[in-house]
Amino acid sequence: MTPDPAARPADVSSTVDPAVTSEVERRARLAKEAGRVLAGLTRARKDGVLLALADALDGAAGEVLPANEADIEAGRANGLPESLLDRLRLDEARLAGIADAVRQVASLPDPVGEVVRGSTLPNGLQVTQVRVPMGVVGMIYEARPNVTVDAAALALKSGNAVLLRGGSAAARSNEALVAVIRRVLREQGLDENAVASVDDGGREAARALMRAHGLVDVIIPRGGAGLIATVVRESIVPVIETGSGNVHVYVDAAADHEMARSIVVNSKTHRPSVCNAAETLLVHRDVAHVLLPTMLADLHERGVVLHGDTATVALAGDVPVDEATDELYDTEFHGLEMTVAVVDSIDAAMAHVRRYSTGHTEAIVTNDRAAARRWTTGIDAAVVMVNASTRFTDGGEFGFGAEIGISTQKLHARGPMALPELTTTTWIVEGDGQVRG
């Protein structure tokens, strides 16, 4: 996979300044204390804080947008690709969307205290498993200022404190957003240390955060393949692994043609810089001669650079299509670029996906219910789509208000993660003096 330029493994230094470690640990201790208070808040209290935060964000354009523009200018000067600049960019509409996402989080049920299961044992003991906050969540991410607010809102609602390492590309934007969040916490009578940034410690702060075992309860990396791999490899704090998105759309022989065209174009071009954008189009040979010329033209007209196998090139007509290679099929482009292949069957499509997929999102377009069932049962991915754009793999679209990441691992959480995934459980055992014989 093509590494994200802003997420190279060097982003986490192998040598940590003791002063940086000490400061990160100090903030983690303060966050832990603040988290103990959050864990006991009622839903009404937490929702009130979130609604106040949303209102504050609505009025914060004057301090947030100039900071973001400075980040954009610096990123452009440093050669950040347009895909990362798009993730980094804020405007009034995006800031309003972030505030609305906070309101949606406030409207959701509180997971804390939810009974997962329970029973009364033959000896009369009542055993109940209930959701409780994780404690302190560490976020390591880059060039995504919206994650700063999403992570804070989801952490606060689920009773957790959060430490943020948002990277140098968005340093000014994140500083402004964290200042708004901490100001709201103070105004609401809560400890501002429940949300803190460690960006001022630079790259070494990320490594110190990953070494804060016992102070930080879980690390969630969010970004390119290089950043995620580094955190998974180096952290001694438990990690929920979010994955890069080498996403496929397979158009079956039984697909509705207009539906297929719409889904493919939307999956690739709606917002090509994000992890749920499609990177590869697979088309069944029986319909390729009808569908591919038009699909390729549609994608080309929207600026997509295309790479295809021999059959695709033969059907491309006047549309320029370069030869695809294994390396290209294995690439998450983060932009207007796509690989294409013609396959002989759904089995061949599934074999291609198994070879190149990162387990994020895989979609089929078909009117054949048997084919759809084979896809949903045979594809190993966090999200499997049938007749829908891959762009719907998103916590907000799933009704979660926001997401803290999209997990591609199989333990604890998988797919878009929101409030329940930021909790663990406690077993409560109530008795009347029972002793074990």
Image (cartoon, grey):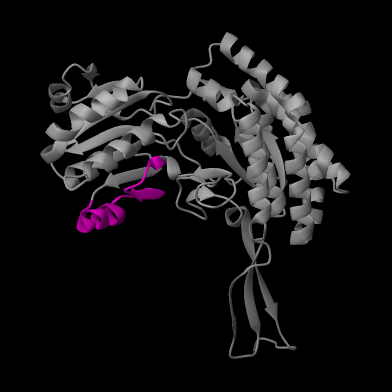
Q: Residue at x 68, y 74 (%)?
A: 428
Residue 294 in percent (x, y) is at 22, 28
Is residue 134 shown to the viewer in this render? Answer: no
Please state the total of marks drawn on the protein image.
0
Residue 337 part of the magenta segment: no
Of all residues, the one furthest to the front in this rendering is: 258
Q: Residue at x 68, y 36 (%)?
A: 164
Q: Is residue 416 above or below residue 174?
A: below
Residue 389 part of the magenta segment: yes
Is residue 169 shown to the viewer in this render? Answer: yes
Dividing the picture into quadrants, the one containing residue 77 is top right
Residues shaded magenta: 367-390
Specify the quadrant that holds the C terminus. Answer: bottom right
Q: Residue at x 63, y 13 (%)?
A: 74
Residue 145 in percent (x, y) is at 64, 31
Specify the quadrant that holds the N terminus. Answer: top left
Q: Is residue 408 above or below residue 19?
A: below
Q: Compare residues 382 and 19 and report the one nearer the observer.
A: 382
Residue 247 in percent (x, y) is at 36, 37
Q: Is residue 420 above or below residue 97?
A: below
Residue 378 in percent (x, y) is at 27, 53
